[in-house]
Image (cartoon, grey):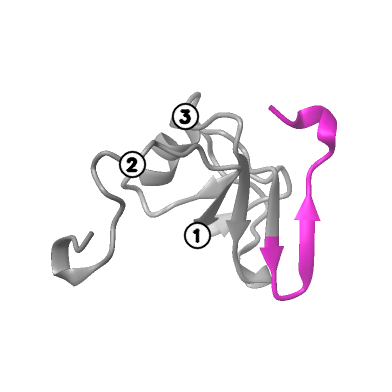
Amino acid sequence: NPGPFGLSQPHPDSPALTPDIILAPLLAFDAKLDRLGQGAGYYDRAFATFPDARRIGVAWSVQQVDTLPTDAWDMPLHAIITENGWIARPMDRAE
């Protein structure tokens, strides 16, 4: 169905889908795979809505910082993909 701006979108009667992966852009990330987003909370809400989805950050390696402040609701990423490769956290930290 055509939606706003002529973009295709699912029909309103279509069944809802649950994503297996959420690709999230970011401004910065640290070694714990915490991410700094753009502040609107869009991806934080998506992570909370789909807690079983793998959270994958998409970044440049220069966006890595030593540490980031986090809040109680922040969910760390499962992995980050950069131009240099894949950075994944140990599975024992997976949620």
Q: How many neighbours does mark 1 have within 10 angstroms: few (below 14), some (14-19), or many (20 or more)? A: some
Residue projecting furthest to the top:
72
Q: Quadrant of the N terminus?
A: bottom left
How far is disc 3 from disc 1 in space, using C-alphas? 16 Å
Q: Position of residue 13 (x, y in %)?
A: 26, 39
Residue type at numbered disc 1: Pro
x then y, percent, for residue 18: 50, 37
- The quarter in which the C terminus is drawn is top right
The mark that comes first in sequence, 3 or 1, is: 1
The residue where tag 2 is placed is 14
Looking at the rendering, the stretch of residues picked out in magenta corresponds to 81-95
Q: Is residue 2 left or right of residue 8?
A: left
Q: Nearer the viewer, residue 43 or 35?
A: 43
Q: Is residue 22 left or right of residue 86?
A: left
Give residue 3's position: percent from left, percent from top: 18, 60
Give the numbered dot on residue 48. 3
Q: Which is in the foreground here, disc 3 or disc 2? A: 2
Residue 66's place in the image compared with 84, above or below, is: above
Badge 3: residue crowd in 10 Å (few <14, some 14–19, many ≥20): few
Q: Residues within 10 Å of mark 2 (few under 14, many from 20)?
A: few
Q: CA distance from mark 2 to mark 1?
A: 27 Å
Nearer-N-terminus badge (3/2):
2
Q: Residue at x 46, y 39 (%)?
A: 17
Mark 1 = which residue?
Answer: 25
Left or right: 88 in relation to 62: right
User: In front here: 64 or 16?
Assistant: 16
Residue 28: give x, y in percent of width and height: 55, 58
